[in-house]
Each structure stands twice: as structure tokens, then as C-alpha cells.
Amino acid sequence: MSEPAPPRSHLARRRALVGAGFGVLLLAGVLVSAVVGQLAVSPAEVLGSLLRAIGITTPWAPQDPVVDAALWVVRFPRIVMAMGVGAALAAAGAVMQAIFGNPLAEPAVVGVSSGAALGAAIAIATGAAALGEGAVAIAAFLGGLLATFLVYMVSRADGRSEIVTLLLTGIAVNAFGGAGLAFVLFLASTASREQIVFWQLGSLSGSLWRESLLVVAVAVVGVVVATALGRRYDLLALGERNARHLGVDVERLRLGSIVLVAVLTAVAVAFVGIIAFVGLVVPHLVRMLVGPAHRALVPLSALGGAVLLVLADLLARTIAGGAELPIGMLTSLVGGPFFFALLWRQRRRSGGWA
């Protein structure tokens, strides 16, 4: 017999504890990220600089303008970008797992990452990056959206789209995007080729305030929308037929969710490159902690994603002295073994890999 579900009061306390724990970890990660760097900054100076920005004068505020500039021009925008990208990718992963009904689903399934990579590569190789700082980001964003739109339109038949068809179409579009990327790399100059490879690895270096705030704004709106759809995702988990009997327009929900995932993921990767496994790892871990109810799962996943990427960026900046590891490579190094462990756990449950 299966174990009885824990009472709602117990779940509510657990969710509150998880949320509080993530909040504490996020504050600690933000503080340490602001302090650690090539230029020494004390925690008191970080706090004093933040208070001075809201009009509160304290003796802790940094007196050296170089320190203040390092915080507000380099470190704070980068931290905000990490929080926004992590929240967007984790929330997108939670939505993908909801509509696919599979904890192994992630945003890359619908081709958004490969489309964004191909769009960015074309912009870099053709010299469009010289048109402005945001040219590569815009090309990546459009590439991600177009790939997702292509996956959805090809998978539709008789006004409906099936999950298996979506998955297979996504695999085909990902393969096409990979081939297109290889072709662009073959034709590109050496300098463009190096820039494309570096973009693919992912990096938060050089984040600007306007980009960071845009990503955070999109992430907040996306999390709010996904949380509002949480009840429908819960009903969808009962099966498409049951969800339809309970009044859920499954096709509209699926279409809206795929668009939401595409926007969240495309905006995130457009500015920082490909960052893998955040949308897979975080929602799955949060689901293990707080249960499958999406009204709690989505916002807590977003908070967990922000924590993960802030800490990952801190590690990427400090793990190798005098150098910075690409954060996308770091998340892949962590996410790859986790993905294998997830597969192994599922196979053990189904009786395989004994």
C-alpha cells in the first residue's frame, strides 16, 4: 500500500520552510557574490552602498568611488542577471514538466535553446553584432521563438498536438539547429568562431542593468502567469481526458504554456548564452521537497533557480584563480551526473538496471 499523503498543514509548513531556506541562501549568495572579487569589498560597504542608494546615509558606505563603481556597474547587475536567468529557466522547466507529465522534460525539448544558439551564431558570423550591443541577443531571442513555433506547428494535426509528436518534432528541430550551427561555424571566421563557441558555453560577464532588469521583469511576469495556471496543471496531471471533463481546455493550455516557456527561455539565454540543466534539476528537486502542487512548485522553483545560478556564478568566478569558468559548462558538469542519477532512479522504480 502507498503511504498516505501528508496533511495540508504539514505541507504548508514544509513549503514555508523551503521558501525561507531558499530566501536565506539567496541573501547569503548575493552578499558573498558582491563581496568576492578581484577588488576587495567588505560586507559593511556592500550594505552601506545599498542603503545610500535608497537615501539612507551610513558610515559604512564606501568612500572610494572605484569600489562604488565596481558594485553598481559590474557586480550588482551580474547578480540581478543571475537571479533573473535562474528564475526564468527553473520556472520554464516546471511548466515543461507539467505539460509533458514527465520530470525529465526541460525547455530545450521544444527547440528553444538550439534555435537561440543558431540565431546568435548567424548574427555573430554575419557581423550583425556590429550594429549594436543587443543585436546578438535579439537574434537569439527570435531564433528561440521561431524554433518553438516550428515545433508546435509541425506537431499539430486536426487542430490538436500530441505530446509524443511534440517530443519527436523537438528532437528533429534540435538536430536541425545543431547542423545549422555546425555549418555556420564552418563558414565563420576564426574570430567569429571563437565568439560563437564562447557564447554557447554561457557567461554572465558584462551584464548590464537594462538587460538584467528586462530578464527579471520577464521572469516575474512568467512566474505569476505560470502560478495562476497551477490549478490547471494539477488537473492535467490526472490525464488529458480527465482534465477535459473537469473543464480544462488542454490544447489552449498547452499552446499558452509552450509560448510561455519559449519566452522565458529565449529571454534568459539571449543575454547569457546556453545554460543547461537548470530547468531540469531545480523543479525536480523542489517537487521532491514540497510535492507536485504547481501553485507552490512554480514560485519555489523560480526561487530555487535564482539561488542555484547565483551560487553557480560565484563558483564559476572563484573556482579557478585568475580565470572565469563559463557558467553553462559548470551547470552541465553538475547537471549531467544528476540527470543520470534521475534516470537510474526511475529505472530502478520500474524494475530495470537491477
Image (spheres, grey):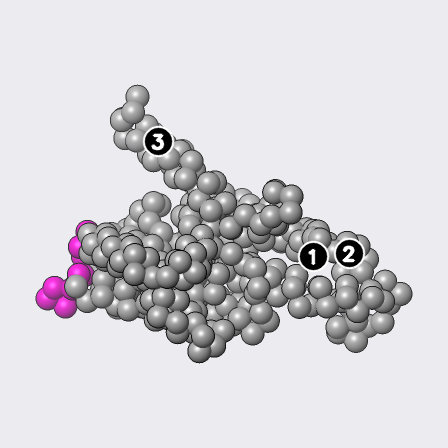
- Quarter occupied by the N terminus: top left
**Displayed quadrant of residue 56:** bottom right
Q: Residue furthest left?
A: 158
- Label 3 – label 1 distance at C-alpha: 38 Å
Q: Identify residue type, mark 3.
A: Trp
Mark 1 crowd level (few <14, some 14–19, many ≥20, 10 Å Cα): many
Q: Earlier in the sequence, mark 2 or mark 3?
A: 2
- Residue at screen point 16% across, 63% down: 154
Q: Look at the picture and state if 170 lies above or below 321.
A: below
Q: Residue furthest bottom?
A: 131
Which disc, if any, is residue 344? Answer: 3
Q: Is residue 157 magenta?
A: yes
> Could you tell me if residue 248 is visible in this image?
no
- Label 2 – label 1 distance at C-alpha: 8 Å
Q: Identify residue type, mark 1.
A: Ala
Name the spot of residue 144 as percent of width and height, x first: 33, 65
Residue ID for mark 2:
41
Mark 3 crowd level (few <14, some 14–19, many ≥20, 10 Å Cα): some
Residue ID for mark 1:
34
Q: Identify residue type, mark 2.
A: Val
Q: Nearer the viewer, residue 205 or 168?
A: 205
